[in-house]
Amino acid sequence: MPDIFFQIIGWSGSALLIVAYVLVSSKKLAPESVKYQLINLGGAACLFVYAMYTVAYPFVLVNFIWLIIGLNFLYKIYTKKDKTRDSL
């Protein structure tokens, strides 16, 4: 694939993480919201792909861990909603 494709993925990931940070810092999104977690996961996934392409293994590890943490929180959010729904 052309290098520009991976450049776009990398820049998109950076933009998504910055947007997520700004939205949470300005209290427009809660850190435990699904929207925030999805934006965050999207950014981490893009940066993971870019780090793999550029063979930047320290950043591969950081973004892999970031993905795992984000997926874990999404799982907790959805299982909490299921428990709340079941208790009604």
Image (spheres, helix red, strand yellow):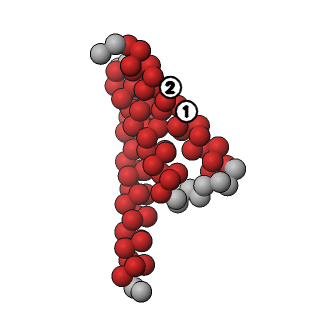
Q: Which residue is identified by label 1?
A: 15
Residue at (60, 55) in percent of width and height: 29
Q: Which residue is identified by label 2?
A: 11
Residue 23 drawn above or below residue 6? below
Residue at (38, 19) in percent of width and height: 5
Residues tagged 1 and 2 counted as in contact (Cβ below 8 A): yes
Q: Is residue 26 left or right of residue 73?
A: right
Of 57 and 12, which appears nearest the observer? 12
Instruction: Report the amino acid beneath label 1.
Output: Ala
Q: Quadrant of the C terminus?
A: bottom left
Determine if residue 77 is in view: yes
Residue 43 drawn above or below residue 9? below
Determine if residue 58 is in view: no
Q: Quadrant of the N terminus?
A: top left
**Quarter where residue 15 is shown:** top right
Q: Is residue 24 left or right of residue 3?
A: right
Residue at (41, 71) in percent of width and height: 80
Task: Find residue 67 and name its label.
Answer: none
**Disc 1 to disc 2, how far (Cα)?**
6 Å
Other residues around mark 2 within 10 Å, as few (<14) / some (14–19) / many (≥20):
some
| Residue 64 place in picture, x, y as percent | 37, 39
| Residue 28 place in picture, x, y as percent | 65, 54
Helix, strand or loop status at disc 2 = helix
Instruction: Report the amino acid beneath label 2.
Output: Trp
